[in-house]
Image (spheres, helix red, strand yellow):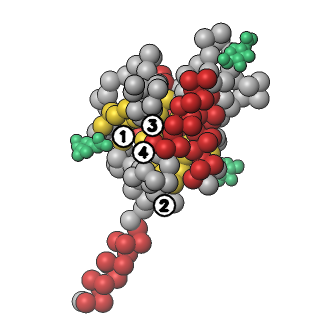
Amino acid sequence: MVRALLSTLLLATAVAAAEPTVYLIRHGEKPSNGSDGLSAAGLERAECLTHVFGPESDYDIGFIMAEQPKSDGSRQRPYDTVLPLAEELGLTIDTNCTKKDYDCVADTVENYEGEGNILICWEHAALNNIVEALGVSSYSNYPSDAYNLIWTDPYPWTEITNVTSEDCPGLDTD
Ligand SMILES: *[C@@H]1O[C@H](CO)[C@@H](O)[C@H](O)[C@H]1NC(C)=O
Ligand SMILES: *[C@@H]1O[C@H](CO)[C@@H](O)[C@H](O)[C@H]1NC(C)=O
Ligand SMILES: *[C@@H]1O[C@H](CO)[C@@H](O)[C@H](O)[C@H]1NC(C)=O
């Protein structure tokens, strides 16, 4: 009886998969001339994120995903936005999922077995599709004129509980 109870408890512990909180952000600002990559403000934001989500923060990021860049230099912004942060945290950015493969993103989250929480950086419109793939049914679309929002989607990933600002000095605050 005791033994059965113990093994049930042990099993429950072993089965408890990772239950990371997912944070979703947009890439940094675009150049006004339409070029690929980040503008000066976008590069500043990428630098700011090393403070927002870095080792001194409470976010405990253990895994970073960015939309897969194309070899022609497009779709590079999400990757460039989280690169300084990834270096700061000593993480490799996962770029296995292409822009519109929302199920790939959801599967990666669901299969994650590592430590810490997950940060996802993508193009803003696709963030809506990604949270839907994760099971969120009700949300306000990520606004096209904002670059600073952090969506918090805790396990089991069916509700965005917080929309906060990165509060990057000079970009989002005075
Ligand atoms: C467009 O702007 C970016 C960043 O501000 C700059 O690096 C790039 O050289 C510009 N491209 C052209 C074609 O002017
Ligand atoms: C991403 O792809 C690499 C290379 O194929 C693979 O080693 C890695 O396990 C993949 N990551 C995930 C989370 O599936
Ligand atoms: C997120 O929302 C929860 C509950 O609504 C609140 O307790 C928590 O402080 C919020 N977190 C942030 C970072 O704002």
Identity of the amino acid at label 2? Glu
Q: Amino acid at mark 4?
A: Val
* Side (left or right) of 11 relative to 63: left
Residue that appears at 51% across and 60% down: 114
Inspect this view and state whether residue 141 appears: yes
Q: Are marks 4 and 1 in contact (CB under 8 Å)?
A: yes
**Location of residue 15 with respect to 116 vertically, above or below:** below
> Which percent across, then down, holds residue 98?
62, 33
Ligand 3 closer than 8 Å to the CB at disc 3? no
Which residue was labeled with disc 3? Answer: 24
**Measured Cα–Cα span from mark 3 to mark 2:** 18 Å
Q: Which quadrant of the view contains residue 132?
A: top left
Q: CA distance from mark 3 to mark 4?
A: 7 Å
**Residue at (40, 25) in percent of width and height:** 174
Query: Which amino acid, mark 3?
Result: Leu
Q: Quadrant of residue 29?
A: top right
Q: Are marks 3 and 4 in contact (CB under 8 Å)?
A: yes
* Residue 112 point in image, percent of width and height: 50, 54
Q: Secondary structure at mark 3?
A: strand
Q: Which residue is mark 4?
A: 22
Upstream in sequence: badge 4 or badge 2: 4
**Helix, strand or loop at mark 1:** strand
Give percent across and percent down for residue 111: 50, 53
Q: Earlier in the sequence, mark 2 or mark 1?
A: 2
Whether label 1 lies within 8 Å of ligand 3 gets the answer: yes
- Vertically, is 61 above or below 9? above
How many C-alpha atoms fall within 10 Å of the one at disc 2: few (<14), some, or many (≥20)? few
Mark nearer the N terminus (4 vs 1)? 4
Inter-mark Cα distance, 4 to 1: 6 Å
Cα–Cα span, label 2 and label 1: 17 Å
The mark found on residue 115 in the picture is: 2
Judged from the image, the secondary structure of the residue bearing numbered disc 2 is loop
